[in-house]
């Protein structure tokens, strides 16, 4: 059997590919446009194709050259909330329309299983915490909307063509392979932990904490952090779940524990031993007070057991990457 990983040169996708290769149970084919991904992030044991999943002739060639592909894992999407507010069509085109193009080819070649990255952003501002899978999905930005549309498209494609899917709704992803060989390298970087660690490295002067008047214990936003290796394991379990003939479904992936932005800063100071200057700044538009996942369903149905259950461990793994790769993959012109 062969699994096709779309977006396998990205932050989470590269950890997925690495995990699959190290497990050694099946062949791994990777497709990535390298628009945001990095070729050097892809484990060399995987077969790599550079191209866009919306290019149907290209995707037909990938499937025809690898006839053993029986499952697709799809990470190839844009994911910046602020960018999506300014340029929603970029998100509906790449994420949503891209999914339609992909499903057409999958249906044509008879590959009927897909595990896809969804997001906590599909829930919008939740009514209650922790968030359960059947809570209302009311996205407040085009990024979340594009992912919710992908979930809906998949539901109808299952009904009509029998393409089975698992939608995995990630909360806040953080951390890197603990040996420091692959990690997070975005341009621009907008996420909290990499920014905190860039301050620790001296690449930025200070952290700006966006808002300290939220309805949370210390006034800063609370988020639920999950490690990309634990996400990768959930995808492996989800592929198995589909191969076992189970019905399409959606699962939250988080640790079920929340950390405030100030708690992340304190933990990063502890782990790195650096001072990490920080100051309070105005709220960033669109940040909900608190986002914490109920992930019992992934644990009970998929048998998911996250290993990175401690925030210091997650931060230490990210620091292993940042401290050894001050310029990330160093592949920008
Ligand atoms: N933050 C700062 N300073 C910074 C960067 C971030 O204070 O320089 C704060 C944010 O305001 C927020 C927290 O750190 O309170 C986490 O922010 P991130 O940008 O790291 O992550 P988000 O919670 O905004 O986003 C994550 C995913 C999105 C997903 C969203 C779901 O990255 O893909 O959760 O709401 F859509």
Image (cartoon, grey):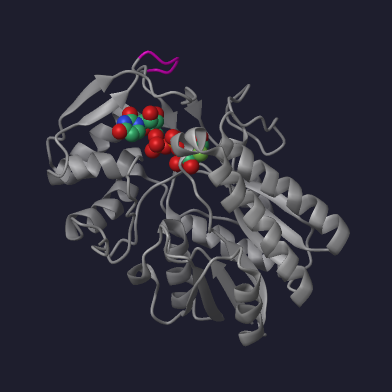
Q: Position of residue 327 (x, y in %)?
A: 20, 57
Of the four image quadrants, the one with ligand 1 is: top left
Q: Position of residue 193 (x, y in %)?
A: 31, 41
Q: Position of residue 152 (x, y in %)?
A: 74, 46
Please give the name of the residue rendered at 44% of the width and 59% of the height, measured from the top-left corner: 229
> Is 79 on the left-hand or right-hand side of 197?
right
> Is 160 on the left-hand or right-hand side of 96?
right
Quarter of the image for the C terminus: give it.
Answer: bottom left
Please give the name of the residue rendered at 19% of the width and 37% of the height, measured from the top-left corner: 269
User: Of residues 74 and 103, which is closer to you in this image?
Assistant: 103
Magenta range: 213-217
User: Of residues 112 and 50, which is closer to you in this image?
Assistant: 50
Please give the name of the residue rendered at 61% of the width and 86% of the height, measured from the top-left corner: 65
| Picture quadrant of residue 235 | bottom right
| Picture quadrant of residue 38 | bottom left
Q: Is residue 274 above or below residue 243?
A: above
**Can residue 123 be seen at all in this image of the molecule?**
yes
Magenta span main SS: loop
**Can residue 244 be seen at all in this image of the molecule?**
no
Q: Is residue 215 magenta?
A: yes
């Amino acid at each position: 059997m062969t699994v096709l990983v779309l977006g396998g040169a990205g932050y989470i996708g590269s950890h997925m590919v690495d995990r699959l290769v190290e497990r050694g149970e099946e062949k791994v084919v990777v497709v990535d446009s390298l628009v945001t991904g990095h070729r050097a992030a892809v484990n060399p044991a995987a077969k790599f194709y550079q191209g866009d999943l919306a290019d149907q002739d290209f995707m037909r060639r990938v499937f025809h050259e690898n006839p053993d592909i029986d499952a697709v894992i799809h990470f190839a999407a844009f994911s910046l909330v602020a960018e999506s507010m300014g340029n929603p069509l970029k998100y509906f085109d790449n994420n949503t329309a891209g999914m339609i193009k992909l499903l057409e080819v999958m249906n044509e070649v008879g590959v009927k299983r897909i595990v896809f990255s969804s997001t906590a952003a599909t829930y919008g501002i939740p009514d209650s915490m922790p968030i359960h899978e059947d809570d209302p999905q009311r996205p407040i930005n085009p990024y979340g909307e594009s992912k919710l549309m992908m979930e809906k498209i998949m539901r109808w494609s299952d009904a009509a063509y029998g393409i089975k899917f698992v939608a995995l709704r990630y909360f806040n992803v953080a951390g890197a392979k603990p040996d420091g060989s692959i990690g997070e390298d975005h341009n621009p970087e907008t996420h909290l932990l990499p920014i905190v660690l860039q301050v620790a490295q001296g690449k930025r002067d200070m952290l700006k904490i966006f808002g300290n008047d939220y309805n949370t214990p210390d006034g800063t936003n609370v988020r639920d952090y999950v490690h990309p290796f634990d996400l990768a394991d959930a995808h492996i379990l989800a592929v198995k779940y589909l191969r076992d003939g189970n019905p399409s479904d959606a699962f939250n992936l988080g640790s079920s524990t929340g950390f405030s932005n100030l708690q992340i800063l304190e933990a990063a100071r502890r782990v790195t031993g650096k001072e990490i200057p920080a100051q309070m700044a105005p709220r960033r538009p669109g940040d909900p007070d608190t986002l914490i996942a109920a992930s019992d369903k992934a644990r009970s149905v998929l048998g998911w057991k996250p290993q990175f259950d401690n925030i210091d461990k997650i931060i230490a793994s990210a620091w292993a990457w940042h401290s050894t790769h001050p310029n990330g993959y160093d592949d920008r012109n």
